[in-house]
Amino acid sequence: MSMTMEQIKHICDAIAPLSLQEPWDNSGVQINTGRPYVERILVCLEITKDVVAEAISKDIDLIITHHPLLFSGIKCIDRRQPLGEYLIELIFTGISVYSAHTNFDAADGGNNDDLAQRLGLTQVQGLFGSGEYCIGRVGMLPQPMTLAELASRTDAALRHPGGLRAVGDSQQMVQRVGLCTGAGAEFIPAAQAQGCDVYLSGDIKYHEAQQAKESGMCIIDAGHFGTEWIFVENMAQQLRRRIGGQAKVIESSVNVNPYSFTL
């Protein structure tokens, strides 16, 4: 029960074609240790010290992440630094790494389609203006609801990630929803241009929230982790459907949310 790395790469590209990634991104193979076969795959949001330890303890051959381990060239691998420690441990134990980042955001059935489905949106289409391949999405709620009700629905759909914030009158009625998982504040103007009543994303900064408020755009900030942890379930399910029983796909049990609590 195993597959080659080339077979896994082909499957990952079928799920989220590398051609869809943003120009600044670095999706694809991060580490290829040269193992001839892959038997056990760990899917996680990103690599941390605990994820590396989990992979080693579970005898993993390949880690598939959402956030790339390597974004740009490195000049020094230093074990005293987190990245250096991860690279040394992974290479030493023979664990390869593959990342599907903005290509998975943009792909059919990727993060943004998944979030739209969890919210029950209909008539879903690309959020134009958010890149050539429309990373974001726009859709309609089945019926209008208040901003507060949509915030509650979002919180439940994302299984209460914590720290959800909203901009706008809590009783304002909304129906047309724009969204982008992760850090999508730059696409607020695109959501406004497409007539969205509310825009849902993560990492909305103070001035971006203030400008949205002044323009009458409602905002729901469910956090970067809060809107992207769904990658693990989604990618694992898609991999299992395509791999069948040829390799074992394991969902990481490590909570990589850097925020431990909110007040």
Image (spheres, helix red, strand yellow):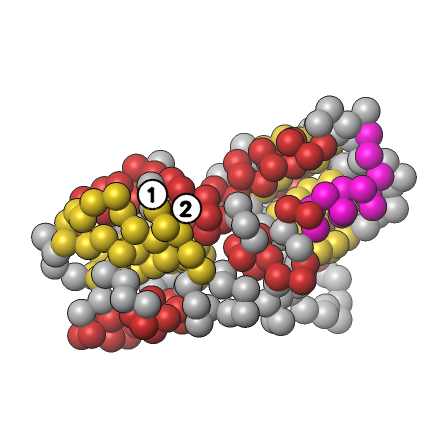
Main secondary structure of the magenta stretch: helix
Name the residue beneath numbered marker 1.
119
Residue 73 lies within the magenta run: no
Q: Is residue 78 visible?
A: yes
Foreground pick, 107 / 98: 107
Quadrant that contains the N terminus:
top right
- Toward the viewer: 53 or 143? 143
From this view, report whether residue 223 is shown above or below residue 154. below
| Amino acid identity at mark 2 | Leu
Q: Is residue 5 magenta?
A: yes
- In the image, the segment drawn in magenta is 2-13
Residue 160 percent location from the top left of the image = 32, 39
Label 1 neighbour load within 10 Å: few <14, some 14-19, many 20+: many
Residue 213 point in image, percent of width and height = 19, 70
Say which element carries label 2: helix
Q: Are marks 1 and 2 in contact (CB under 8 Å)?
A: yes
Residue 136 vs residue 214: left or right?
Answer: right
Relative to 46, residue 207 above or below: below
Where residue 85 appears, as percent x and y from the top left, is 69, 52
Q: Residue at x 15, y 49 (%)?
A: 146
Identify the residue shown where x is 42% and y is 63%: 127
